[in-house]
Image (cartoon, rainbow, N blue to C red):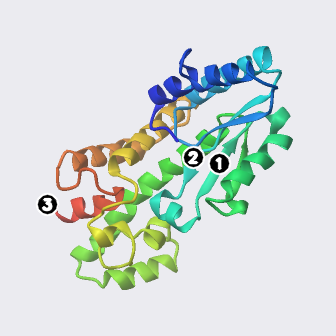
């Protein structure tokens, strides 16, 4: 799992130290065996597609088709990793998916439930699924924080308000699994000063990736711009920088209306 496109290109494609170069070198010292390369980071789709293309070319020309690449970005964050409940979204070449995907699942099932390892389509589809999921998650983080801050400012019982929301149409993952209001839920980032979890900087990054994807396919968006601006304002303040993205609740609560 790598943090960004530059790291991915270096690790996979460097002509001397990259994984593809290493696979070719290893093949020269023995018989060819099938190998699987799996990238679980949330990386720009064009980079994933470029690495997949390079892998296919090397595999076909030098490795007798024994090397396969899949993108398998992960959702669930540190809490899901600790609980072993991560979700994986896999992109795999269609003509090899019948043989490759079962192998992928055999590895990933140790970190998440097998039924939540999804074959999303061709290489790059897993990344697109993940980016779209994070796009929605980022926006709902701000929306839920705004709603609950209204309740706080109105003097309402916010824990009870959360219970009502979670039994009604406003329920979402943020309100039910990672509530942004301190004291409402135990063992979530807001209960420990927003330490751990999904950092606001990463949340802003993947929201930006969603905006880029939307633009590339001609999909109109409205809410990404204001949400990104809110994240940028919060990140500019050292009180919120580096914290879990749900710290936007604290930022709203401590801001002047």
Mark drawn on residue 130: 2
Q: Is residue 206 left or right of residue 32?
A: left
Q: Nearer the viewer, residue 9 or 20?
A: 20
Find disc 1 in the rendering and name its residue: 89
Marks 2 & 1, CB-CB < 8 Å contact: yes
Identify whether 115 is placed above or below 204. Answer: below
Identify whether 139 is placed above or below 64. Answer: below
Residue 218 can be seen, yes or no? yes
Q: Quadrant of residue 115?
A: bottom right
Residue at the image position 24 percent from the left and 50 percent from the top: 241
Q: Which of pointers 3 and 2 lies earlier in the amino acid sequence?
A: 2
Q: Secondary structure at mark 1?
A: strand
Q: Which of pointers 2 and 1 lies earlier in the amino acid sequence?
A: 1
Query: Badge 2: few (under 14), some or many (20 or more) residues near its Cα, within 10 Å?
Result: many
Q: Nearer the viewer, residue 234 or 52?
A: 52
Residue at the image position 29 percent from the left and 63 percent from the top: 249
Q: Viewer-nearest of labels 3 and 2?
A: 2
Residue at the image position 45 percent from the left and 38 percent from the top: 3
Find disc 3 in the rendering and name its residue: 256
Task: Locate residue 83, reporting x and y percent.
Answer: 54, 68
């Amino acid at each position: 799992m790598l943090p960004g496109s530059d790291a991915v290109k270096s690790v996979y494609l460097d002509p001397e130290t990259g994984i593809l170069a290493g696979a070719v070198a290893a093949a020269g010292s023995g018989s060819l065996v099938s190998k699987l390369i799996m990238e679980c980071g949330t990386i720009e789709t064009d980079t994933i597609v470029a690495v997949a293309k390079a892998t296919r070319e090397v595999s076909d020309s030098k490795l007798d088709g024994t090397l396969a690449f899949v993108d398998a970005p992960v959702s669930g964050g540190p809490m899901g990793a600790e609980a072993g409940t991560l979700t994986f979204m896999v992109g795999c070449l269609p003509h090899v998916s019948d043989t490759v995907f079962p192998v992928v699942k055999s590895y990933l099932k140790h970190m998440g439930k097998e039924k939540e390892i999804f074959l999303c389509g061709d290489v790059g589809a897993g990344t697109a699924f993940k980016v779209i999921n994070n796009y929605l998650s980022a926006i709902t983080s701000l929306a839920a924080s705004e709603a609950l801050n209204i309740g706080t400012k109105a003097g309402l019982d916010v824990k009870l308000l959360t219970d009502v929301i979670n039994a009604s149409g406003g329920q979402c993952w943020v309100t039910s699994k990672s509530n942004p209001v301190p004291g409402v839920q135990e063992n979530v980032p807001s209960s420990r000063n927003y330490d751990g979890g999904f950092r606001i900087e990463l949340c802003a990054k993947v929201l930006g990736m969603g905006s880029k994807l939307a633009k590339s396919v001609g999909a109109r968006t409205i809410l990404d711009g204001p949400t990104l601006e809110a994240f940028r304002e919060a990140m500019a303040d050292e009180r919120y920088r580096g914290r879990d993205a749900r710290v936007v609740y604290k930022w709203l609560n401590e801001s002047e209306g």
